[in-house]
Amino acid sequence: VISVQATTFASYAMRYTSLMSASVLDNSNIFAAIIGSRMILKRRYSFFHLLGALICFIGVLLNIIADYKRDLIDPRSLDDAYAELESDEYPDRVIGDILAILGGIFFGLSDVVIEVLVKNFGGAHEYLGCVGLFGTFVAIVQAALFERASIS
């Protein structure tokens, strides 16, 4: 369920922000996985792991700031046809950024939960079978609720 929700957030993010922004911001799964595995699995990380996560975090912050500033600037004041086209296509970049970050967080938490379930409650085969069965059901329900107009 968490993985399906993460995919839903990530796909909705693509509607509001560019592919580059959504891809970079989806890397927030690294923070969620590190924090989740530290709290739940009691994992320890070396200085270099944390430094890599910090560099990734700085990249995510810079991307959010750039999208926020881009939303504030009137593209017609710039003499750039691409910027004007991009602002018309993605007028609400910050909403897309938030959805991409939520998707990344859910992906990271999903990875931690999957590791706990596979390690403590069964093997990989049982997990993959349950993901296929329940993921399909959850995706159908979400599509029926949120994509009704697109389907019909």
Image: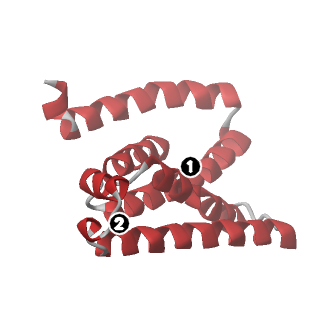
**Residue at x-position 21% and y-position 41%:** 146
Position of residue 13 in the picture relative to residue 61 (left or right): left
In the image, 109 versus 49, the foreground residue is 49
Q: Which mark is residue 150?
A: none
Q: Residues within 10 Å of mark 1 (few under 14, many from 20)?
A: many
Position of residue 47 in the picture relative to residue 116 (left or right): right
- Locate the N terminus by quadrant: top left
Q: Specify how the rendered protein is coloured.
A: secondary structure
Q: Residue 131, percent across and down?
A: 52, 31
Quarter of the image where one finds residue 74: bottom left
Quarter of the image where one finds residue 88: bottom left
Q: Residue 95, percent across and down?
A: 32, 62
Residue position for label 1? 110
Q: Amino acid at mark 1?
A: Ser
Q: Residue 60, percent across and down?
A: 56, 67
- Locate the C terminus by quadrant: top left
Q: Amino acid at mark 2?
A: Val
In the image, 87 versus 9, the foreground residue is 87
Q: State whether residue 27 is above or below residue 117.
A: below
Q: CA distance from mark 2 to mark 1?
A: 24 Å
Sooner in the amino-acid sequence: mark 2 or mark 1: 2
Residue position for label 2? 94
**Residue at x-position 69% and y-position 61%:** 37
In the image, 61 versus 44, the foreground residue is 61
Q: Residue 99, percent across and down?
A: 38, 57
Position of residue 112 in the picture relative to residue 61 (left or right): right
**Residue 46 visible somewhere in the drawing:** no
Q: Check disc 1 and report its element: helix, strand or loop.
A: helix
Q: State whether residue 103 is above or below residue 59.
A: above
Q: Check disc 2 and report its element: helix, strand or loop.
A: helix
**Residue at x-position 80% and y-position 65%:** 49
Q: Residues within 10 Å of mark 2 (few under 14, many from 20)?
A: many
